[in-house]
Image (cartoon, rainbow, N blue to C red):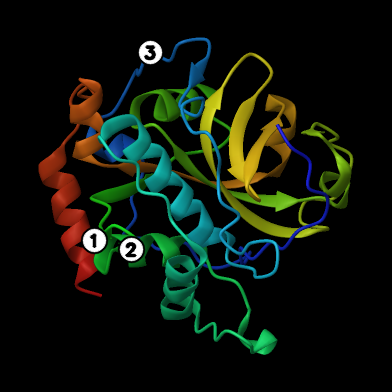
Amino acid sequence: MTDHGPMKLGRTRGAAPDPRIRPLARYGVTDILAPPAIDWYSRIPAWPMLANDTVGDCTVAAIGHVIQQWTTYTDAQAVVMDDAHVLAAYGAIAGYRPGDPASDRGAACSAALRYWIVAGMATPAGGPDTLTGAATLDPRDLEAVRGAIATFGALYAGLALPLSAQNEDIWRATTGAPGSWGGHCVPLVGYDATGPVCVTWGGLKRMTWAWWGVYAEEAYALLSPDWIDAQGRDPAGLDWARLAGDMAALRAG
């Protein structure tokens, strides 16, 4: 676990959620039995920064890290994203132009996810890498959070970081005002009794469950049959036909 100190954020807060990204429960995923701990990160030797030390592209960097994570665990060759592909996607999503700081305005989680679902992410290995779908869940429902990480490999999360998060090795202090530093987006790639483990700023970061309960604002299960099939799992009762219908509406604009 690493502590990089203050870095760039980039998740816009207060954006209206996209109503076409529906709750996970809509698809019949109930009573997922989550183990006490899960680790979907130890096979990854290094995580790239993906320009989030200088640019507020965290919503897209988080996607890049999930692609790397999933392909490490499911494919013969991991797809490791680079700055160029992430910044190109950030430009398409939010209008960022390299060399123009005024265009670095961040992006909403839902906008980044819609781009991944509709257009797909170009990768150094070709692509595009396209997400099948996404579904929301209540970040305060810790059993649902654990179950989604255990089953789908990663949880795409929007955080309202307090200033105290700038200098903590483990995010644990809960007295700071949510969002006093700003909005951030990370993928959760594991958890244990202490709390979730996320990827951010080129490394892994731990947080306590109490901290997560105060500062998590959004949580999305990322649904991919490639991940599920590769792991030999099929969430009980997952209604893929309904998911496909919802995602068709999302793609239609």
Q: Is residue 144 above or below residue 204?
A: above
Dot 2, how many residues are within 10 Å of its Cα: few (below 14), some (14-19), or many (20+)?
A: many
Give the residue at x 63% y 78%.
Answer: 105
Q: Identify residue type, mark 2.
A: Met
Can the viewer see residue 59? Answer: yes
Query: Where residue 148 sits: x, y (%)?
Result: 41, 30
Q: Label 2, label 3: how many angstroms apart (C-alpha)?
A: 31 Å
Q: Nearer the viewer, residue 137 or 185?
A: 185
Give yes or no for contact between labels 2 and 1 (Cβ–Cβ under 8 Å): yes
Q: Quadrant of residue 151?
A: top left
Quarter of the image where the N terminus is located? top right
The reply, left or right, for residue 144 in relation to residue 3 is left
Of the numbered discs 1 and 3, the one sitting upstream in the chain is: 3
Give the residue at x 27% y 39%.
Answer: 26
Of the numbered discs 2 and 1, the one sitting upstream in the chain is: 2
Callout 1: helix, strand or loop?
Answer: strand
| Nearer to us: label 2 or label 3 | 2
Residue 75: assigned label? none
